[in-house]
Every structure is written in structure tokens, then in C-alpha cells.
Image (cartoon, rainbow, N blue to C red):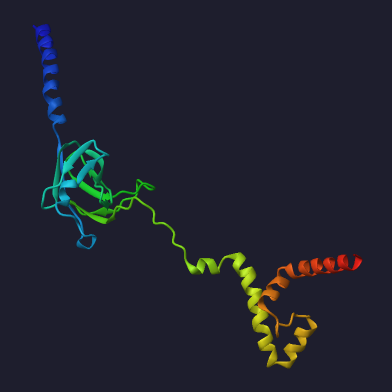
Amino acid sequence: MRLNLLFAFLAVIPAFLAETAPAEAQALYTIEGEAAVPADLLPKKFWQRSLRILVDHGKYVGFVREDGKFAIHNIPSGSYIIEVANADYVFEPVRVDISSRGKMRARRLNVLQPNAVSQIAYPLNLVARQPANYFRKREELRVTDMLMNPMVLMVAVPLVLMLVLPKLAANDPELQKEMENMKMPKLDGMDMSDMLANYFGGGQAKKAIKKGGTTAKKNR
């Protein structure tokens, strides 16, 4: 008699476990929220149709209704990353934690510090931050970049000093004497082409060629 009761009890246990296991597996929940595009971003007509709500990079997918609201069903308890996939706008991803009792908690997604908690309101309110930009803007040629070029500064600064200092020295006798002691080139009556040729060393080469030509003629 006791053995029969024992066998009957052992036969009931698997059936009891089989009934309780699916009940625990059916504890599924729904993530709800709303997506919006600000008016200053000039939203396109029927922009809701191009949005997809991704849970854990596409493990679960939800769609946005015309009023901007969405609901993703049949999600078990756990921690999930919620993203808005769209080709025109950039949304900030968030993390949603679902407890075993179905309590929802939303917080900002911090990749560098996953344990940091910055809680946000639930149901979710996902707002586009900026339009999606897939191309880098080409650099434009600016006049200031050309003027600040080291090669331009090496040529322009000495040239400006040679033009400005003599005029300043004309009103200051002491400065004029110092410039004479420094043996600064005089610009009075000097042609600009000759001045640049002397500055870059081309004038000396021309004089050497002329001297060579005159000596050759004299030898003939």
C-alpha cells in the first residue's frame, strides 16, 4: 500500500512541474512609449512610417502609429536597449529594465559606465536630437588661412617692415640713426622689382652675369 502511494506521488510530480513551467515562461510584458520629431527639424510627411523601434538591436521590433505612440509586446523580464532606427533623424538610445514582477524602469544608456543610473520617465518619450548627417562638410578656402601661412608670413612681414620703418624713422631722428647703423636698405627711389630681386638674392646673380659679360668683351 505504501509503495503504491509512493509511485503515485512520483508520477504526479512531473505533471505538476510540466504545468507550472509554462506558467512561469508566459510572464511577458509590454514596452510602451512615444516617438516625436521637433518642428524645428522640419519633419517629413508621414515620418512615423519610416521609424522602427528596436529592442536589443533587433531582437524585438516595434512600429510607430500615426500619433507617434508604440508598444512592443511579449517581452520577458530583463534589461534591454531601446533604439529608434531611422535614416533621416538621430534618436538617443535608452535602457529599460523589467523586473520579475513587471516593474518598468527607464534610464539613459551610458556605454562607458553601464552601472551609472540616470533615470528618465516611463512610458518612454523618444525625441529626435538632430538630422542624420552622412557626409562630412568639405573645407572651404579662406583668406585668413592663406595669410596665416608660414611661407606668406616669412615674405610679408619683412616686406612690411622695410616699407613702414623708413616712414616711422623720418619723424624720429634717433630711430633714423639706429637704422643707419643697422645698414638697412634705403627704399627712396628704389624700384619694387629691384628691391624684391635684391631681397631674394637674384640681384647679385644678375650683377655677376653682367660683370662676366663685360670682362669677356674686354678680353676680346
Whole-percent x and y of residue 48? 16, 50
Judge from the rendering whether residue 145 lies leftward or rightward of residue 213; answer left or right.
left
Along the viewing direction, whichever of 207 and 26 lies nearer the viewer: 207
Placement of the C terminus among the 4 image quadrants: bottom right
| Relative to 13, residue 87 above or below | below
| Relative to 98, residue 140 above or below | below
Whole-percent x and y of residue 108? 29, 51
Quadrant of res 199: bottom right
Q: Pick out the residue farthest to the front.
A: 220
- Whether residue 72 can be seen here: yes
Judge from the rendering whether residue 70 lies leftward or rightward of residue 82; answer left or right.
left
Along the viewing direction, whichever of 155 and 16 lies nearer the viewer: 155
Whole-percent x and y of residue 185? 74, 80
Q: Pick out the residue farthest to the right.
A: 219
User: What residue do we see at 12% from left, 29% from top?
Assistant: 23
Placement of the N terminus among the 4 image quadrants: top left
User: What residue do we see at 86% from left, 67% from top?
Assistant: 217
- Whether residue 123 can be seen here: no
| Relative to 83, residue 131 above or below | below
User: What residue do we see at 13% from left, 26% from top?
Assistant: 22
Whole-percent x and y of residue 82? 24, 45
